[in-house]
Image: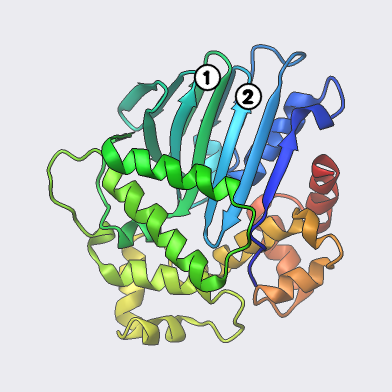
C-alpha cells in the first residue's frame, strides 16, 4: 500500500491560540523525525508547511518564524531512524551542524544530515526552506557514503527545482513514476554533496545492503516478506546478508519490522485514511495480529496506536 501523491497544507493558524507552537512542533515531528523544538516567540509564532510523499521520499516546503529544531541523543534513542534529511534554504538563514561540522546556510545554500545521530537547525529569523526526507538506502544507490555537511553546485540547484516542481504538480504519480522520481532525488542529492575527493564510493561498503533495504521498503505490505526472501532477491545467502546487516548494528528482521512500524505510524495520522481502522492499517503493512502490532508500536513510540492517532489527527484537522 502506498499513500496517494497529493499535497498536504498545514498552518499554525489552524491551531488554538496559546498552543500554536506546541502543535507545530508535533507536526514537524510527524513530518520529519522527532525533534526538540523551541522558539523565542511562542505567542506570535507563525508556521506553514506544504508536504508531499512520493514513494519513499517526503518533500516539504516550510515557512516559519524564528525557531530551533534539535535532534538530540534522547530523540535518537527513543525514536530511531535511518533516514537522511536534505535541506535547501530558500530565504532567511539557518545555522546547522552534525558531528564536528557546523555551517551557516544562506539562500541557495543546502545541507544534509542523517537522523541516526544528533543534529540541529537554528533559524534566527523567519525563513523558507525545502526539506527532503529520504531513506539512506536510496543514497547508497547514488554512491554516497562519507560526505561533508554542505550541498553545492548544479546538483543542489536541480534538486531545488525538482522539489519545488513536485509540490506544484498536483497530478498523482504511478508506482513506476514514483520509483523513478525517488532515484532522481537520490542521484541529485548525491551529486550535490561536497566531497573531499572526486571519487564516489559505495555506501556501507556493500551494494547488497542498499539493494536489500530498497527491496524491503517496496515489499513491506507483503506478509511473505522474510529475511530469506530479501536474501533471495539480492542473490546471496541469508547468513551472509545477515552479516552485512550486523555491520550496521541491526538485523534483516528488525529492519523489516521497524520499516513496517514507520509506515503504519505515518498512515495513522493521514487524514485521507481516517475511515480505516487501526487494525486495517496494521494488516495493510504486513502485521497479522493487532495486539502484537500495538505492543511493538508502544515500545517504539512510547504511546499506543489509538492514543497517538486521536492526539495527532485532532492537530491536523
Q: Residues within 10 Å of mark 1 (few under 14, many from 20)?
A: many
Which residue is located at x 56 percent, y 28 percent?
69
Residue 185 visible, this orientation: yes
Q: Which mark is residue 106?
A: none
Q: Nearer the viewer, residue 161 or 278?
A: 161
What colour scheme has been applied to the protein in the rendered image? rainbow
From what the image shows, is residue 14 above or below residue 217?
A: above
- Mark 2: secondary structure: strand
Whole-percent x, y for residue 116 in the image? 44, 46
Tell me the residue that label 1 is attached to.
123
From what the image shows, is residue 98 above or below residue 106?
A: below
Tell me the residue that label 2 is attached to.
64
Which residue is located at x 78 percent, y 59 percent?
272
Which residue is located at x 54 percent, y 50 percent?
166
Whole-percent x, y for residue 243 in the image? 31, 72
| Circle nearer the viewer, 2 or 1 | 2
Closer to the chain start, of discs 2 and 1, is 2
Which residue is located at x 63 percent, y 62 percent?
172
- Mark 1: secondary structure: strand
Amino acid at each position: 500500500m502506498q499513500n496517494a501523491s497529493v499535497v498536504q497544507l498545514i498552518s499554525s493558524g489552524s491551531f488554538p491560540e496559546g498552543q500554536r507552537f506546541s502543535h507545530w512542533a508535533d507536526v514537524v515531528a510527524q513530518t520529519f523525525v522527532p525533534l526538540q523544538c523551541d522558539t523565542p516567540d511562542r505567542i506570535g509564532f507563525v508556521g506553514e508547511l506544504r508536504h508531499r510523499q512520493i514513494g519513499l521520499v517526503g518533500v516539504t516546503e516550510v515557512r516559519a518564524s524564528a525557531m530551533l529544531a534539535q535532534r538530540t541523543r534522547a530523540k535518537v534513542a527513543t525514536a530511531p531512524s535511518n533516514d537522511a534529511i536534505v535541506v535547501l534554504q530558500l530565504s532567511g538563514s539557518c545555522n546547522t551542524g552534525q558531528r564536528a561540522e557546523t555551517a551557516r546556510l544562506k539562500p541557495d545554500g543546502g545541507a544534509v544530515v542523517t537522523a541516526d545521530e544528533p543534529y540541529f537547525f537554528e533559524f534566527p529569523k523567519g525563513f523558507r526552506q525545502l526539506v527532503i526526507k529520504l531513506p539512506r538506502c536510496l543514497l547508497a544507490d547514488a554512491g554516497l557514503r562519507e560526505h561533508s555537511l554542505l550541498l553545492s553546485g548544479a546538483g543542489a540547484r536541480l534538486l531545488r527545482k525538482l522539489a519545488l516542481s513536485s509540490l506544484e504538480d498536483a497530478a498523482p504519480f504511478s508506482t513506476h513514476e514514483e520509483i523513478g522520481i525517488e532515484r532522481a532525488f537520490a542521484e541529485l542529492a548525491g551529486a550535490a554533496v561536497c566531497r573531499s575527493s572526486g571519487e564516489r564510493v559505495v555506501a556501507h561498503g556493500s551494494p547488497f545492503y542498499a539493494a536489500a533495504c530498497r527491496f524491503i521498503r517496496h515489499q513491506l505490505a507483503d506478509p511473505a516478506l522474510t529475511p530469506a526472501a530479501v536474501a533471495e532477491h539480492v542473490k546471496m545467502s541469508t547468513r551472509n546478508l545477515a552479516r552485512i546487516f550486523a555491520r550496521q548494528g541491526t538485523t534483516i528482521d528488525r529492519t523489516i519490522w521497524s520499516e513496517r512500524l514507520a509506515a503504519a505510524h505515518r498512515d495513522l495520522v493521514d487524514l485521507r485514511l481516517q475511515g480505516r481502522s487501526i487494525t486495517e492499517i496494521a494488516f495493510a503493512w504486513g502485521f497479522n495480529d493487532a495486539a502484537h502490532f500495538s505492543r511493538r508500536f508502544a515500545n517504539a513510540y512510547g504511546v499506543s496506536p489509538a492514543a497517538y492517532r486521536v492526539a495527532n489527527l485532532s492537530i491536523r484537522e
